[in-house]
Image (tube, grey):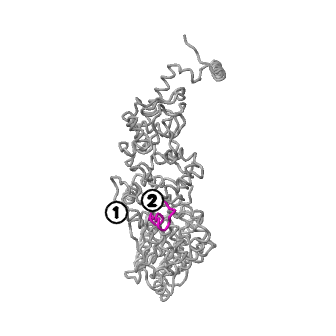
Amino acid sequence: MKIRITPRRLAVGAGIALLGGAAFFFLAPYNIAASVPHFSPVRWALHGYMQNAVAIRSLTLAPPSYMDPADPALQRLGAGHYATGCASCHGAPGLPRSPIVKGMRPAPPPLNDADFETEEYYWLVRHGLKYTGMPEWSGAHRPDEPWAVAAFMSVYQDVSEEDYREMAFGPSAQDGGRAAVSFGALSGDLSLQESCNRCHGTDGLGRDGMAPKLAGQSATYLADALRAYRADIRQSGFMEPLAASLTDKQISELASHYAGLDGTWRGQTLNDGDAARGEELARRGDEDDDIPSCLSCHDNERRPDTPRITGQDARWITIWLRLWREEPVTSSPGANRMHAAARPLEDEDIADLAAFFAGAEKP
Amino acid sequence: MCLPGCSGRHYWFSGASEEAQSIETLAWILFAGAGVIWLIVMALAFFAMRSSGRSNTEKSARRMILWGGFAFPTVVLAALLGTGLLTLKSIVAERSDLTLEVEGEQWWWRVGYPGGVVTANEVRLPRGRTAEILLTADDVIHSFWAPALGGKIDMIPGRENRLTLTPTTVGNWGGLCAEYCGGAHAQMRFNVIVMEPDAFDAWLEDEAAPAQPESGPGLEAFLGEGCGACHTIRGTEAQGLVGPDLTHFGARTSLGAGILALDRDTLRHWITHTDTLKPGVKMPAYPDIPTEELEDMIDYLLSLT
């Protein structure tokens, strides 16, 4: 039998489809209640599509040279953020999920037997997943940060409960003794100061390159930075969730605490970069490439409120110079100047500067 | 003629240097010759229209083409080429009394004199002496053009072009970039100040000296804001290489590469709204300098004569 398609039949068909669609939309027969599991073909299709999408979209990803997923410090940084942002829903090594999240549909899976590549974890952490409750990375324009969480996830299955506590909370402040992760508690039962110490260390020196050194930095600068994180002006998926709840009083207390610590620094270098050329750039700049000298501003003898970078770890100098090169990062009046200064830098210049600043003594 | 290029400090026929005068002479020869040829062609066309139907013989037509279409243009063009080359030879002097280096940057001019004197956006030349100007560029192709003095030569990164000028008329002549070089190309100007030789020597001696004064609240403000990252003031800690040397900034006649007269108000506006005055400029604006500090800084910069 042959059905001829006429305009009339086409119109009738379209009308029926429209009516059917409208009926589906208004009568809502598919049960979206989380209490009823997905119809299994639907679950299969959604989950399979998600896995394909993650695999395809992470094909071309690779960590930058200054973010080595095998670096224990990077894994510890990821573990620290995992405790803040991920454990609430996914549980943690040795710590089961809260009963509340088990009622989500889809429920955030425990990650003990998750099977993703490091790059796939990065993609998931950076972009999140629609229709699941998995959020995107909260620091806009910070493609560097999710590599830390991906680094932690790449070893997650080999991490014991004790290791996890040590990685995420540091040797001195243990968030221990609980049977499951309490939902919604960002950093467990830690005090505010302990929460900061997780990454920045009790001595404010950044726990072996996990986080920037804060000891002895200017209190004005530290408070400005915290306020900018709180207001979502300065971007960081690590800092913003913690800064969001701070009061002005807490900010000024934290700032004076770190400003008062002993600021004798020596940074960790990366394997590349020519420190001698970095020093020349930092002190004199370069005429042909229009690079201004760094130390004309970052001289803390003359300008105590300027962030100190001498002795900061090479990774942080690299990350921040690359961020500054792209755009003015914060609301501070110096933002345009820092962008103007970083704009002419090539990757090689950044590596040289990082090698110099990380290796230099406190000015 | 009421075009801006036809009078004043940018006028092509000002004849403010020997080289410009040679080129001017050549231009008049060209105009006159072109006028004569035009008249001859018009006259021939007129006769051709008026002549009766009598046709040319093949022989006379052939002769006409040979003489009028081949021999005459060859002779005229060869003579013109010869004159042009001779003029060119005469204006590229064998010897010079003074050598300058001018480097085009986006969007200003770095000017260097013998003895380590570096200034910006102002080329001072002594009247009656031959100056050789070595032209290069830092980033993209620029072109050095001071119409009244006759020079217009491209500045090419990685290459050094030479221009010689022997100024004959004292004055403040205008110069500009004559090759599109980016957004603020039209705001890339300079002054050519032709001085009496004695005055020039005195000026060069002053320029070679370090900054006066070498301290004060204005300098502290200048260093405190980090201006020394880009600017040099010889004799102080400010040793930046990116922007114009400001050692004798107060002695200059203009601001922002020839786009503004230099005074307190324009300087204040320049520091606080740099990007508004010259879009895309590398110098970031400093809108938040405390008023007192800013005024001290302006006092200091204007005192650098």
What residue is pinned by disc 1? A276
Q: State which quadrant residue A277 falls in.
A: bottom left
Which is more foreground, mark 1 or mark 2? 1
Q: Position of residue A110 (x, y in %)?
A: 45, 30
Instruction: Kindly state the secondary structure of the residue where label 2 is placed.
Output: loop
Q: Position of residue A5 (x, y in %)?
A: 59, 18
The amino acid type found where label 1 is placed reads: Ala
Residue A299 among magenta residues: yes
What residue is pinned by disc 2? A344
Mark before the other along the chain sequence, 1 or 2: 1
Residues drawn in magenta = A292-309
In the picture as drawn, the residue positioned furthest to the bottom comes out as: B198
Q: Main secondary structure of the magenta part?
A: loop
Residue B243 among magenta residues: no
Q: Which quadrant: the N terminus of chain A?
A: top right
Give A334 or B170, whichever is nearer the viewer.
Answer: A334
Labels 1 and 2 in the same subunit: yes
Q: Chain of mark 2?
A: A
